[in-house]
Image (cartoon, rainbow, N blue to C red):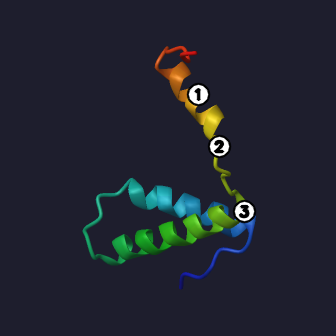
Amino acid sequence: MLKQIKTKIEYKSAVDRIYELMQKQIKVNSDEYNELDVLSILVENYESKNFPIELPDPIEAIKFRLEQLNLEPSH
């Protein structure tokens, strides 16, 4: 039975299982497909709580994007 991921060990196990399932050609709405779907949700929930990604500073984000495009800011 699938349950909320609360520890690093449970997280690692879930990620490993997701990888294993993704290597297979599973059919939509099969038990494995549903397991993959639920595990993905559980892992995403765990990651959002334990590894939050902060939004970048808007100015720094613009500078970064300009750099990626090899552009210079206009003055």
Residue 1 coordinates in the image, percent (x, y): 53, 85
The 10 Å Cα crowd at callout 2, few under 14, some 14 to 19, many 20 or more, is few
Q: Secondary structure at mark 1?
A: helix
> What residue is shown at x 66% (from left), y 52% (from top)?
53
Q: Secondary structure at mark 2?
A: loop
Residue 68 coordinates in the image, percent (x, y): 51, 22
**What amino acid is at disc 2?**
Pro
Residue at image mark 2: 56
Q: Nearer the viewer, mark 2 or mark 3?
A: 2
Label placed on residue 46: none
Calculate the distance from the C-alpha at mark 2 to the C-alpha at mark 1: 10 Å
Residue at image mark 3: 50
> What residue is shown at x 40% (from left), y 56% (from top)?
22
Calculate the distance from the C-alpha at mark 3 to the C-alpha at mark 1: 26 Å
Residue 6 lies, with reference to residue 18, above or below; the image says below
Report if the CB atoms under discs 2 and 1 are less than 8 Å apart: yes
Indicate the quadrant where residue 34 lies: bottom left
**What amino acid is at disc 3?**
Asn
Residue 58 coordinates in the image, percent (x, y): 62, 40
Residue at image mark 1: 64
Q: Secondary structure at mark 3?
A: helix
Residue 64 lies, with reference to residue 25, above or below; the image says above
> What residue is shown at x 69% (from left), y 66% (from top)?
49
Indicate the quadrant where residue 25 lies: bottom left
Q: Answer left or right for 20 relative to 53.
A: left
Indicate the quadrant where residue 8 lies: bottom right
Report if the CB atoms under discs 3 and 1 are less than 8 Å apart: no
Q: Answer left or right for 41 relative to 60.
A: left
